[in-house]
Image (spheres, rainbow, N blue to C red):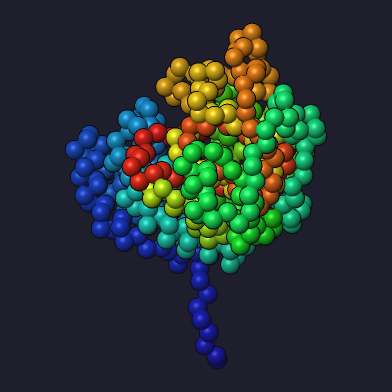
Amino acid sequence: MSSSEPKQTPSSFHFETPLLDAESHSLLHSISDHGGYAYVSMAALAAAGDSRAAEAAGEMAWEQLHSGPWHSVLPIWRDAYSMACLYMARFHFAGGDFKEALRVLDMGVIMGGPLFRNDLDSAIAKVSAEARSVRVLEDGRIDESSLGCQERNNEVAWNLPVKALTNTMIAKMSSLSLEGFLREYFQPGFPIIISDGMAHWPARTKWKNMDYLQKVAGGRTIPVEVGKNYLCPEWKQELITFSEFLSRIQSNDRSDDITYLAQHPLFDQINELRKDICIPDYCSVGGGELRSLNAWFGPPGTVTPLHHDPHHNILAQVLGKKYIRLYDASLSEELYPYTETMLCNSSQVDLDNIDEKAFPKVVDLEFVDCILEEGEMLYIPPKWWHYVRSLTTSFSVSFWWNNCDENSTSSSY
């Protein structure tokens, strides 16, 4: 009788958690000091093999994360949530439920603290590898293997703001040197389109392939925006799998409930996609450092309303095309920013339907605009107001960086 390798059973699925093993005692002590005795009790039971206790610990930490404004949540509760996610994922993985294990681990990445981040990342890599080997990541079929750049009807995608493409167009350059970028655009603070800065990116071809996106990200959980834009009262956020998100993009639904993956650090979450892009050399100009790297992925008709950001920004158009309008930073008063702290970087003016009586100053303001084509990058100087509308299925990447003498003090939509 010939010998063979033993067949792996679901109970043998396991991932290592060296940080959790080393730091759990100290974290639980800190949680006890802040009155989290019930959580400590459930976490101890979870570590001993009680799956229900792991779920209970996760629920307790989740409640603490939603006990007030995000900035007021104690950091230990973010780490506590990561801890519970690792325990829950361990039980799901051992039981062969890879989909749920990935969901819980992603929740730990999105909502949890930094203490156990390396454990979360290594666990995600292990679960993803096993899941792909048995083909259980797929939770819905996409009809097309290629992610095309279909356009919605003209009433939606091409319903551009008044006077669009009739004023000065944003200048476009190829083979722009770092010295030329610094002297002509960065220092004086002028926008510029760089037409050939990302031809070498693997993403330019890989991200058009639906099978590839499904393979590397289909089972991952991501936060998305649902609705016209973040200024509308019906706007909301959801947590769905990347596979479901792709299904929504490919659907023929023409409702206002557009689903948009907007300003999410996707590449910090999914390392395979991070390998498909490169940080532009232009982001080193000024001697500062990269502050954020975010994904913007959605169907035709997504809109980011008029707003400004605090940092230098390069928006790289990997897939599809967008209409973008820019107003000089000096025109803030004429663009009627909100007075509320949380929205002070956003304009009250709806460029898709300008109320000229309420906002008379905006009507004759000078602006520059463009159609940002696939493969192009747009440099947006700090504080320049910008409005963005996708004209096709669109996947963009934004790179924020600061000067060496600037501090990162705020975030933006």
Left or right side of 323 for 217:
left
In this view, which residue lies farthest toward the bottom?
1
- Residue 304 placement: quadrant: top right
In percent of width and height, residue 73 lies at 33, 33
Judge whether residue 174 can be spotted in this image: yes
Q: Residue at x 45, y 67 (%)?
A: 12
Residue at left offset 46%, top offset 23%: 344
Visible in this render: residue 295?
no
Which one is in front, 44 or 29?
29
Q: Quadrant of the N terminus?
A: bottom right
Choose between 302 and 82: the one closer to the eye.
302
> Residue 139, how many percent across, how many down?
64, 51
Instruction: Tell me residue 371's x, y (percent).
Output: 70, 40
In front of the other: 335 or 64? 335
What residue is rendered at 37% in x and 63% in y? 16
Which quadrant of the structure image shows residue 133? bottom right
Up/down of 367 relative to 334, above or below:
below
Residue at 47 percent across and 63 percent down: it is 126
**In the rendered image, the vertical position of residue 363 relative to residue 116, given as above or below:** above
Q: Between 377 and 50, which is closer to the camera in this rendering?
A: 377
Circle count: 0
Find residue 146 and report its horizontal and vertical position in percent.
Answer: 74, 55
Please indicate whether residue 126 sits to the left or right of residue 393 in the image. left
